[in-house]
Image (cartoon, helix red, strand yellow):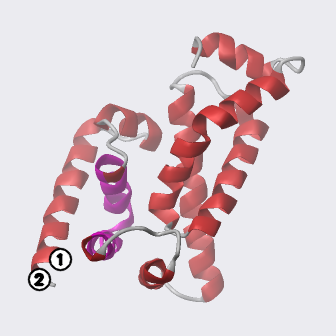
Amino acid sequence: MQDEKIFITELLNPETQNEAFKKLVREYQRPLYMHIRTIVLNHDDTDDVLQNTFIKIFQHLKNFKGESKLYSWMYRIATNEAITFINTRARKSGISNEELQDKMIKNLEADIDYDGDEMQLKLQKAVAALPEKQQLVFKMKYFEEMKYEEMSEILETSVGGLKASYFHAVKKIEEFLNSN
């Protein structure tokens, strides 16, 4: 994408905002979709969360201070929207987030848009058994191949803390896979 400061100016200028936002959606729709999908697992839910993410991005562009990259800021919004979606869905269903994760994994097996094999499904089950922060860190590092520095900006936490979370997540996943 072009120079970020110029692009942000275009996003904030009422005369160029619509075209700039269309460009932003074209550029980031796929990566944000993939990021959200690793969290909510279901295609239709991912589409809903992605739509809400772009609405929030558009509504809050004027508040973007440029202290992080635009990419990081948008991923933070997408992450928060996905987590809010999961928490809301669990609360409305009257179940815990962990129970919801189990239910989502079971639904993943029946999802026609899911193209993973049996091993991928086992991995998803292992990841679902992790605490929320470890899940998020593992998914971003393993599935999206994000660098710790990028995750640090998105999750607003230290690189050292992320490395520790990832290390613990990997150990727990290995234990889960070896015991099943």
What is the x, y in percent for residue 110?
49, 83
Q: Amino acid at mark 2?
A: Ser
Question: Is the Cβ of the residue at disc 2 closer than 8 Å to that at disc 1?
Answer: yes
> Bounds of the magenta span?
120-142
Q: Tell me the CA gap for discs 2 and 1.
A: 5 Å
For label 1, count other residues whose C-alpha is less than 10 Å away and answer few (under 14), some (14-19) or many (20+). some
Residue designated by label 1: 176
Tell me if I can see residue 76 in this picture. no
Tell me if I can see residue 158 in this picture. yes
- Magenta-span inclusion, residue 136: yes
Q: Amino acid at mark 1?
A: Phe
What is the x, y in percent for residue 135?
35, 62
Residue designated by label 2: 179
- Magenta-span inclusion, residue 96: no
Q: Residue at x 27, y 37 (%)?
A: 159
Q: Residue at x 46, y 69 (%)?
A: 114
Tell me the quarter of the image containing the C terminus: bottom left
